[in-house]
Amino acid sequence: MRRLTRPSRFWETLAVVIVKPLSLLLVRHDWRHGERIPRAGGVIIAANHLSWSDPVLLSHFLYNNGRWPVILAKAALFRVPLLGHAVRSLCAIPVERGSSEAARSLEASEQRLRDGGAIFFYPEGTCTRDPGLWPMVGKTGAARLALASGAPVIPVAHWGAQELLPYGEKRPRLFPRKTFRVSVGPPVDLSRYSGKPPQGEVLRDATADIMAAITVQLAELRGEKAPETPYDPAGR
């Protein structure tokens, strides 16, 4: 049985032929610390989310640094004719939001990690609603997966995708040509949660550590100081 951590050669080639030239055409690249991404073994890539365009741009970055991103995608995409087949063939994992079925996506992700896959996670669950576009309070899925699997969490921050395609807009702003910046941090230290039940406060604290690590990288990219307290959409 083929491990679902990488698509067939046909689908991988097709995706690369489409995505790489598109990424190179649309944006300049300022990529930093790509060597911090492990080239083998199960790993969780945790990133901030700014635009509908950043999954494509980040996938190019990860591919160029030796990893095929196993993306968690909305289950509705899998039900769209043709698109659903393509998404499934590219090894994405369906996520049923707000459903008891959501746990299945974490189970599938854990299996992909055991098989050596690179799970691409947006801990915020959606594009940030922070007025300054800083990372929000994250959801606990990435932390839950990390504590259950023991896989390292690599924080990745990016900046620039929101200039190409601002959240909520359908037409990209192609001119002037934008720069897509990426910075990779060292693995998030979650050792203090080892042996503790992955629930409640443990998951919230581990999630906060992951989001803080992403924010550190984003502050470096932006050359700005991040807010002391992350934006919490549930509290607004």
Image: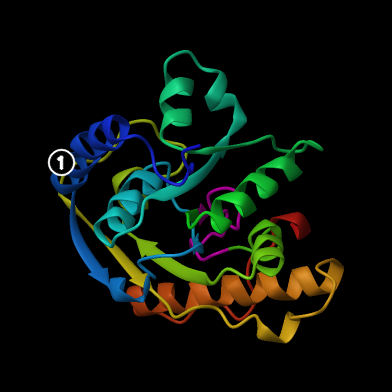
Which region of the structure is painted magenta? Answer: 120-135
Residue at disc 1, secondary structure: helix
Residue drawn 29% across the image and 60% down it = 66
Q: Which amino acid does label 1 sit on?
A: Pro
The quarter of the picture where the C terminus appears is bottom right
Q: In this view, does 127 lie to the left or right of 125?
A: left
Q: Quadrant of residue 64?
A: bottom left
- In reply to whether residue 122 is colored magenta, the answer given is yes
Q: How many discs mark residues in the rendered view?
A: 1
Above or below for 227 versus 165: below
In the rendered image, is residue 122 in sight?
no
Residue under label 1: 21
Q: Position of residue 6 (x, y in %)?
A: 40, 44
229 in the magenta segment: no
Closer-to-camera residue (13/46): 13
Q: Which secondary structure is most common in the magenta stretch? A: loop
* Quarter holding residue 153: bottom right
Res. 14 image quadrant: top left
Q: In this view, does 89 lie to the left or right of 223?
A: right
Q: Residues within 10 Å of mark 1 (few under 14, many from 20)?
A: few
Color style of the picture: rainbow
Residue 211 seen: yes
Residue 19 to residue 150: above or below:
above
Q: Which residue lies furthest to the bottom in this view?
A: 192
**Residue depicted at x 34% and y 50%:** 59
Q: Is residue 40 left or right of residue 163?
A: right
Say which residue appears at 76% left-offset and 36% top-offset.
Answer: 101
Farthest front residue?
Answer: 1
- x, y percentage for residue 24? 15, 48
Give the residue drawn at x 31%, y 31%: 11
Q: Which of 195 and 71 is in front in this view?
A: 195
Give the x, y percent position of residue 228: 61, 81
